[in-house]
Amino acid sequence: MQRQTVRLGEMESKQNLTQHLSWETAVDAFLWVKRVVGCSKKTLDWHRFSLQTFRQCHADFNLPCPSPIHCPSEHIRKFLEWAQNKGLHPVSITTYFRSIRAFFRWLYSEGFRDDIPTNKIQLPRTPEPLPRTVTEEHFLAAIKTLNSSEFSGLRNLTLFVLAFDSGARLGELLNLRVGQVDLVTKTARVCGKGNRERIIVFGRTTSLLLRRYLTFYTAAFNRIPSPDDFLFVFRNGSPLDPRYVLRAWHNAQKKAGLQVLPFHGLRHGFARVWLLRGGDAISLQILLGHKSSEMTRRYVTLWGQDLKSIHEKVSPIDRLVTPSVFQGLKKVR
């Protein structure tokens, strides 16, 4: 009897919370759960901004919606229309929608809603622009503008080379500690999206460049770096800021008279070179840390025309038999 009373009390408490759950409380709880499961600060900021933008639409249209518990799918459609009328890019609208969808799925999973309103709405179609890819020629022209005789120039050169040689993301490289890099095996342990660790690989030249940079590092700070020190730092020892790196990469390209490509283009460039030189898609997916094979498939499709020349070199049939064999087959017909 006492156990039933407790259960009834819990149900009444849940019902009261459901009826009075405010947007602010629900969003804070959603973000807290995302933080607990390991989402990065960037992801959390994206969710918060997306949901704030969604609420701004409610305010602009004076939509009566005091709680997300009762928010209908019509309000989400109204948001998509509102965003389009504001001239937002289709890709931006899609990212907002995905965040809103994640929020309502969480409300449903926690028992605050009996439905997921975004399920009634088709994800807006977005164009898939070609990745802005850094080629070998573009990369060489850009890094030639750097002064590797100075600490900052050598540091930037090392960072750019490691990015192009490994395909790692900028955030992964800036969070690297000295102890996570192994110059003997030419590998480094990085923490990628979703706090997933993986091993990136680099070549002999990059290893030599890293060794030279660490020598400069020791001289600049008059001490041997500890394993816990950040690998890429300013002269005051603080870790490099992403905005500084993006600006440095931008300036190097401008100085070389090149079309400015994003830093992420180095990652695309690595994928392109990997495929064009015979690397397989499964290994590429592992090296890049892609959770799904969707992006890897895009790479393969994008450079499929170039892959034909590779197939001419590795075709199992062409290597297995001679033209005379096929002449014999034609005779059999």
Image (cartoon, rainbow, N blue to C red):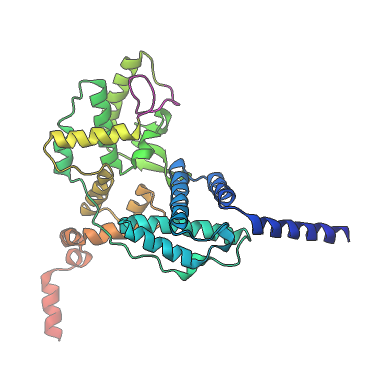
Please tell me which residue lies in front, 290 or 54: 54
Q: Position of residue 2 (x, y in %)?
A: 87, 58
Q: Which residues are magenta?
A: 226-240
Q: Is residue 52 magenta?
A: no
Magenta stretch, overall SS? loop
Q: Please state if 169 lies on the left or on the right of 65 as rendered.
A: left
The residue located at (42%, 44%) in the rendering is 192
- In the current view of this chain or complex, which residue is farthest to the front? 62
Tell me: residue 233, above or below residue 22. above
- In the current view of this chain or complex, which residue is farthest to the top? 222
Q: Please state if 134 lies on the left or on the right of 52 as rendered.
A: left
Please tell me which residue lies in front, 236 or 149: 236
- In the current view of this chain or complex, which residue is farthest to the bottom? 333
The residue located at (11%, 73%) in the rendering is 324
Q: Position of residue 170 (x, y in %)?
A: 33, 39
Tell me: residue 27, above or below residue 158. below
The residue located at (26%, 59%) in the rendering is 300
Q: Please state if 250 lies on the left or on the right of 68 as rendered.
A: left
Location of residue 3 by image quarter = bottom right
Q: Position of residue 167 (x, y in %)?
A: 30, 44
Q: Position of residue 112 (x, y in %)?
A: 62, 60
The residue located at (46%, 50%) in the rendering is 52
Please tell me which residue lies in front, 298 or 99: 99
